[in-house]
Image (cartoon, rainbow, N blue to C red):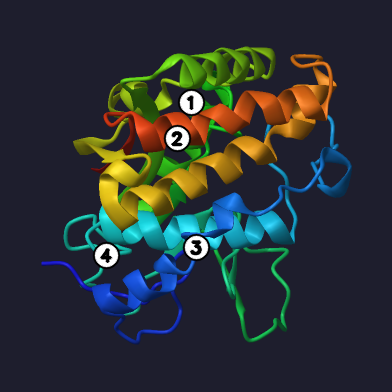
């Protein structure tokens, strides 16, 4: 049994049901946004901290794109469910860790340590402390653009550590483009170089099930679906294409900083034929993967 939860980024804290029709209405307003002017690299904010591999910006433009992407993937990939791990949503007072929460609308703080001697005597309402693994569910989405392969291994072991026995972790990750034309291939080559320079693995969706087993998880399950890009896929194809083009545009900062293109005009020229190719030549799609595993 699964429970429908509201269409909010991250996991919800308000338990009001949202219908698929409501999610469609929220997502459909994005259809024309992909044709708007894209911000220049100098107008975006990228995390400059040493050791941070994340290649997308952290700003209001990206917040908007992530919110729409969340609604699209919840509706299309997860069939309207934010919690799709089996039985995970049935427990009373479910404790959820939203890993890399992004644009989540609110949060509760839970501190974990090996002993309680230094825990504060007085805490805020939204804070609690424990010496045990306390989470029934860990939710994580789309960290292919943030974690190197060795970081993934560390992260999965940490997730396993903080879950209660019988707790679940669930993932959503992007995978690969199907049936790429020449324009898509040209973009793919540039982005592959970007990922390689940051030691990010574009095949993490395919590797994740085995990595979960190696980290000690059981009952590992995954499913991959491909969704059309472009008008040949109808309204959802237009929405999907706009989301991905906007993601490609958001990568211009690190692409330019690595010298993978000479300037912004060259980058725009790289992107411009991609959307046209998707619209005029049916067949290109992008695969998305969802997975869960139990401790």
Tell me the number on the disc at residue 156.
2
Q: Is residue 245 above or below residue 81?
A: above
Q: Earlier in the sequence, mark 4 or mark 1?
A: 4
User: Mark 3 sits on what residue?
Assistant: 30
Q: Earlier in the sequence, mark 2 or mark 3?
A: 3
Q: Nearer the viewer, mark 4 or mark 3?
A: 3
What kind of element bears circle 1?
Answer: helix
Q: Quadrant of residue 105?
A: bottom right
Q: Is residue 238 above or below residue 264?
A: below
Residue sitting at 28 percent across and 31 percent down? 282
Q: Is residue 194 above or below residue 23?
A: above
Residue sitting at 69 percent across and 68 percent down? 119
User: Mark 1 sits on what residue?
Assistant: 153
Q: Is residue 27 left or right of residue 88?
A: right
Check contact, mark 2 vs mark 3: CB within 8 A. no
Check contact, mark 1 vs mark 3: CB within 8 A. no
Q: Nearer the viewer, mark 4 or mark 1?
A: 4
**Which quadrant holds the C terminus?**
top left
Residue 222 percent location from the top left of the image: 22, 37
């Amino acid at each position: 049994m699964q429970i429908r939860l509201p269409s909010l980024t991250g996991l919800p804290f308000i338990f009001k049901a949202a219908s698929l029709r409501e999610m469609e209405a929220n997502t459909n307003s994005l259809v024309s946004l992909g044709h708007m002017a894209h911000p220049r690299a100098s107008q975006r904010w990228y995390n400059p901290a040493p050791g941070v591999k994340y290649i997308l910006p952290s700003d209001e433009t990206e917040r908007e794109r992530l919110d729409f992407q969340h609604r699209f993937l919840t509706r299309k990939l997860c069939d309207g469910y934010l919690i799709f791990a089996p039985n995970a949503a049935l427990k009373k007072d479910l404790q959820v860790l939203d890993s890399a929460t992004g644009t989540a609308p609110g949060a509760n703080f839970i501190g974990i340590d090996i002993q309680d001697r230094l825990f504060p005597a007085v805490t805020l309402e939204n804070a609690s402390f424990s010496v045990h693994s306390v989470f029934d569910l860990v939710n994580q989405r789309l960290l292919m653009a943030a974690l190197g392969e060795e970081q993934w291994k560390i992260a999965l072991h940490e997730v396993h550590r903080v879950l209660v026995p019988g707790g679940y972790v669930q993932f959503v990750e992007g995978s690969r483009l199907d049936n790429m034309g020449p324009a898509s291939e040209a973009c793919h080559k540039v982005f592959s170089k970007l990922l390689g320079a940051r030691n990010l693995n574009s095949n993490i969706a395919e590797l994740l099930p085995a990595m979960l087993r190696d980290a000690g998880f059981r009952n590992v399950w995954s499913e991959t679906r491909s969704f059309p890009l472009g008008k040949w896929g109808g309204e959802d194809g237009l929405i999907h294409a706009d989301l991905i083009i906007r993601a490609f545009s958001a990568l211009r900062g690190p692409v330019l900083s690595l010298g993978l293109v000479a300037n912004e005009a060259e980058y725009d020229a790289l992107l411009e034929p991609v959307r046209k190719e998707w619209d005029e030549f049916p067949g290109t799609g992008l695969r998305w993967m969802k997975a869960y595993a139990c401790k």
